[in-house]
Image (tube, rainbow, N blue to C red):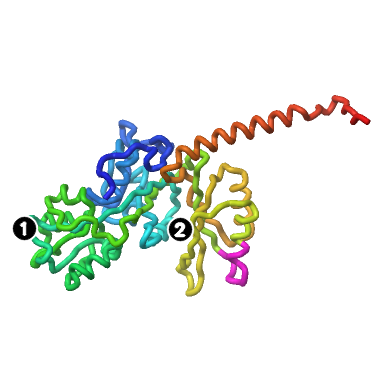
């Protein structure tokens, strides 16, 4: 699993731990950040990789819906939720809530390496296990191990990986009666007094999860290495409708980093398109593209422009700043040669 120790901002591609411009609601100015609890989740671990978020008051909540609703109602300043996994894809509860049920803006993304461990109370051996508890997404990511090592074990769903460890460690009735193990992060084992029976039980060790922070208002300033997320709603289903949407990006040489369809929940066969693209709403080419999409489609929901994660993020931002300064100097030199309206134009030589 990724280290439980906080990482510096460059290691996760964030802009030097700078806050997202959200004023803290606490008397001391600190932010209140809601996340999927309890303590020991990967969400909390990802939070701790961000220096400014780690200094905030963290509020553990029972579900992803609770996190996003708490932001919408103003009970917390920011919500921090998983939005995409390298194996299971989009976290549907998060994206559907952002698109259909709330009006929140993404402030930042964080990518975390995911490693899962099988843990149990002291004295329980692997051969004893008759039941395995975890959030279904995590259980699905350990299919091969479970089929090979625990083919007869019953799977029990919990709200999160850490919640499985908490329930097991506290002896909750839900997990009592037969020898049970939990699939959870390493941090959860130490928090809830469990022993790790098998490390790294995930099928794909290169697995990562992308998390986002969301707020009611505010768009972070452009950094030169940004991502914008939108949802596009069609006026009607007709041949070439997706092509016409993609054409707006292709015509402007805008790179898409994600494209998926989601049912609109209005009628069978009606879908909207969720698009992540490189760039920021402050970039004129992005603004021009979104303007044309908004004019042509039934609707465009703007989900935010925010610093893009990635180990190369700071270097890309520095290169972008340098390239921008050089481009400004080039334009300035050309404009210096433009004759004023009252100046005579020099005739060309023979």
Give the quadrant of residue 12: top left
Q: Is residue 243 magenta?
A: yes
CA gap, disc 2 and disc 1: 47 Å
Label 1: which residue? 123
Q: Is residue 115 magenta?
A: no
Q: Residue 99 carries which label?
A: 2
The answer to whether residue 67 is left or right of residue 101 is left
Start-end of magenta stretch: 234-244
Residue at 21% x, 50% y: name it.
Answer: 186
Local SS, label 2: helix
Local SS, label 1: loop
Q: For the residues carrying marks 2 and 1, which lies nearer the camera in this image? A: 1
Establish if 6 lies above or below 177: above
At label 2, counting other C-alpha atoms closer than 10 Å, the crowd grade (few under 14, some 14-19, many 20 or more) is many
Give the quadrant of residue 124: bottom left
Point out residue 149 in the picture as x, y percentages from the top left corner.
Answer: 19, 67
Point out residue 299 in the picture as x, y percentages from the top left corner.
Answer: 56, 59
Report the front residue among 256 and 55: 256
The answer to whether residue 138 is left or right of residue 271 is left
Establish if 117 lies above or below 320: below
Residue at 37% x, 40% y: name it.
Answer: 11
Point out residue 311 in the picture as x, y percentages from the top left corner.
Answer: 41, 43
């Amino acid at each position: 699993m990724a280290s439980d120790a906080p990482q510096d901002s460059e290691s996760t591609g964030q802009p030097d731990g700078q806050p997202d411009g959200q004023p803290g609601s606490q008397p001391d100015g600190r932010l209140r950040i809601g996340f999927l609890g309890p303590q020991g989740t990967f969400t909390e671990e990802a939070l701790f990789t961000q220096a400014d978020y780690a200094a905030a008051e963290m509020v553990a909540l029972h579900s992803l819906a609770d996190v996003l609703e708490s932001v919408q109602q103003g009970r917390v300043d920011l919500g921090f939720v998983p939005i995409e996994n390298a194996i299971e894809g989009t976290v549907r509860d998060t994206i559907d809530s952002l698109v259909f049920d709330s009006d929140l803006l993404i402030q930042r993304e964080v990518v975390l390496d995911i490693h899962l461990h099988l843990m149990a109370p002291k004295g329980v051996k692997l051969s004893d296990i008759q039941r395995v508890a975890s959030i279904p997404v995590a259980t699905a990511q350990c299919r091969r191990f479970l089929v090979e090592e625990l083919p007869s074990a019953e799977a029990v769903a919990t709200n999160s990986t850490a919640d499985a460890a908490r329930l097991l460690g506290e002896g909750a009735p839900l997990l009592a009666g037969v020898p049970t193990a939990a699939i959870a992060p390493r941090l959860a084992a130490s928090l809830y007094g469990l022993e790790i029976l098998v490390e790294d039980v995930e099928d794909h060790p290169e697995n990562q999860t992308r998390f986002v922070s969301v707020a009611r208002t505010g768009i972070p300033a452009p950094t030169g290495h940004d991502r914008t997320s939108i949802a596009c709603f069609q006026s009607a289903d007709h041949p070439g409708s997706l092509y016409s949407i993609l054409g707006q990006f292709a015509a402007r040489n805008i790179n898409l980093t994600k494209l998926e369809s989601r049912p609109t929940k209005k009628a069978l066969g009606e879908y909207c398109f969720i698009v992540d693209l490189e760039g920021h709403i402050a970039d004129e080419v992005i603004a021009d593209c979104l303007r044309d999409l908004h004019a042509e489609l039934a609707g465009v929901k703007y989900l935010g422009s925010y610093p893009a994660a990635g180990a190369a993020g700071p270097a890309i931002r520095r290169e972008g700043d340098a390239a921008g300064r050089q481009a400004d100097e080039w334009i300035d030199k050309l404009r210096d040669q433009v004759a004023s309206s009252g100046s005579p134009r020099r005739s060309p030589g023979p």
